[in-house]
Amino acid sequence: MTDADYDLCVIGGGINGVGIARDAAGRGLSVLLVEAKDIACATSSASSKLIHGGLRYLEFFEFSLVKASLREREILLNAASHVVRPMDFVLPHVPQQRPFWMLRLGLFLYDRLARRDRLHASYVLDLSSAAFGKPLSPSYGRGLCYADCVVDDSRLVVLNAMDASARGAEILTRTKCTLITPHEDCWVLDLEGKDVAQTRRVRASMVVNAAGPWVENILKDSKMLDDRGSVPTIRLVKGSHIIVPRAYEGDQSYLLQQKDGRVVFAIPYEGDYTLIGTTEEDFVGDAYAPMISDAEIEYLCQAFNGFFQKKISRADIAWTYSGVRPLVDSGAKEMRKASRDFRLYEHPQSRAPMISVFGGKLTTYRLLAEKVIDRILHMSNRFAAPWTASAFLPGGDFPGGDFDAFLQYCREEYSWLPPDLLLRYACAYGARMDRFLEGARSLSDLGDSFGAGLYEAEVAYLIRFEFARDVEDILWRRSKLGMAMNEEEIEHFHSKFKDILQDVDP
Ligand SMILES: Cc1cc2nc3c(=O)[nH]c(=O)nc-3n(C[C@H](O)[C@H](O)[C@H](O)COP(=O)(O)OP(=O)(O)OC[C@H]3O[C@@H](n4cnc5c(N)ncnc54)[C@H](O)[C@@H]3O)c2cc1C
């Protein structure tokens, strides 16, 4: 090894970057992670929020990807059952689409491809009589119900960043890597921070480029794509979601088959809403600012209206978001057939190892991180055992891993908290909620109130432990309270935020 500043520098604070930093720090490496903006500011907070095998990938014979994803689903459910929750999915049969036997066979495989300790097996539903059929148009007679998981995606990212930091990784947000220069035994990285003090040059013995949709940009800027060779190509595919006030009764989700062969999900969201998505469109432009198009809005409303008794229109939409998938370009003509698997590329420009990450899914980030660190250690003739498959994420360490029992404990311990607020805290922070509730006996002990259940104590916690540095970080990524607060409340929060930030002095 060289006398570099860090063993490993990770570029990108999306799910893959933070997962890699966490794994590496836990294996004893000195780690620096640089994120150009905020943790989870890009694709990793714009997903469909599913931790799933991906039932539809079976159709494209991606058995190993589905199997690996299903294994990860179980691991994540154990590691963080506050942010990863089981969910029933109802799949109505559409006679003009995939035959019923095919759906049953798909789910038969889905049930059996990997071990399933907490989730039920799939079963047939008579939609005309079952409660899950009630919200649907009467034309849907038969269906299937299977279990998968939903996740608060941006919180999953921040939990990994927190754990990486707790294990010694340095996490620098609002710090962009502008140049990577190969040296014989190390890599030199130029970092540009918000102010001059954060702008510096560091040396790392190993580098992982996990910049998601920007994975090629940093390579181009560093002239590492001049001779492209076997470096994979990235295909940027935009996906959008709409959010409407709760559009049906019940806690179940629906998988809605569309005429074009795609599927659209309807998922209960943040208590009072239904999340509907997603679309797929090739994307060119600023990947930090993808926007939903009129055609996508129309497509998603129709996708929903084709199945449900209640009809929705553009006027019902409370919020939309779009994200850009960084997929490995396999040359597939139809976007829905493009693989969600990942590829790791080892750069040859230095004796010191560097890997770029192409593609992936939120669901498989832990496995991806494990493979990256196994590989990069092997490249530098080192070994440290993998450890993340059986480790909790911050807040997920309830006795017996039983979230419902934990919730019951919280109800007794914090009987003074309004039930909705208690549920939000428990789902977001799990066993960590005591960090900002300890000693409090009433809401007034939590400091200033900013509306929608946001109190100063939570804000200070997010600044101190969760790298929040801005109002947006709190309202749209650490939480989704931005949806529940009105303009006045947001303005008031803006006016107070700087003072809280100064007081906490992270
Ligand atoms: C619409 C949609 C729905 C999806 N649904 C699901 C789903 O339900 N389940 C699932 O498993 N997967 C899903 N995915 C896929 C999943 O969201 C992505 O695979 C994953 O979030 C990609 O993470 P990432 O870390 O590679 O990229 P990102 O989250 O985009 O992170 C990359 C980070 O790198 C930073 N960065 C870029 N350049 C630099 C630089 N030079 N210096 C420092 N930092 C830099 C960026 O600011 C960014 O934060 C979905 C994706 C989309 C778009």
Image (cartoon, grey):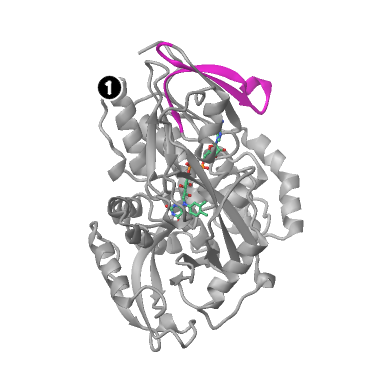
Percent from the top left, x then y, of residue 34?
53, 30
- The secondary structure making up most of the magenta span is strand
Percent from the top left, x then y, of residue 316?
66, 72
Is 202 contained in the magenta span?
yes
Residues drawn in magenta: 184-209
Q: Looking at the image, which is closer to me, 406 or 415? A: 406
Where is the C terminus found, in terms of image quarters?
Answer: top right
Per the image, the residue denoted by label 1 is: 382
- The residue depicted at 61 percent of the width and 62 percent of the height is 296
Neighbour class for label 1 at 10 Å: few (<14), some, many (≥20)?
few
Is 496 contained in the magenta span?
no
**Which amino acid does the dot numbered 1 rest on?**
Arg
Quadrant of residue 336 in the image? bottom left
- Number of marks in picture: 1
Instruction: Establish if 148 lies above or below 188.
Output: below
**Do we see residue 452 in this rendering?**
no
Instruction: Establish if 336 lies above or below 33.
Output: below
Q: Looking at the image, which is closer to me, 334 or 364? A: 334
- The residue depicted at 41 percent of the width and 83 percent of the height is 131
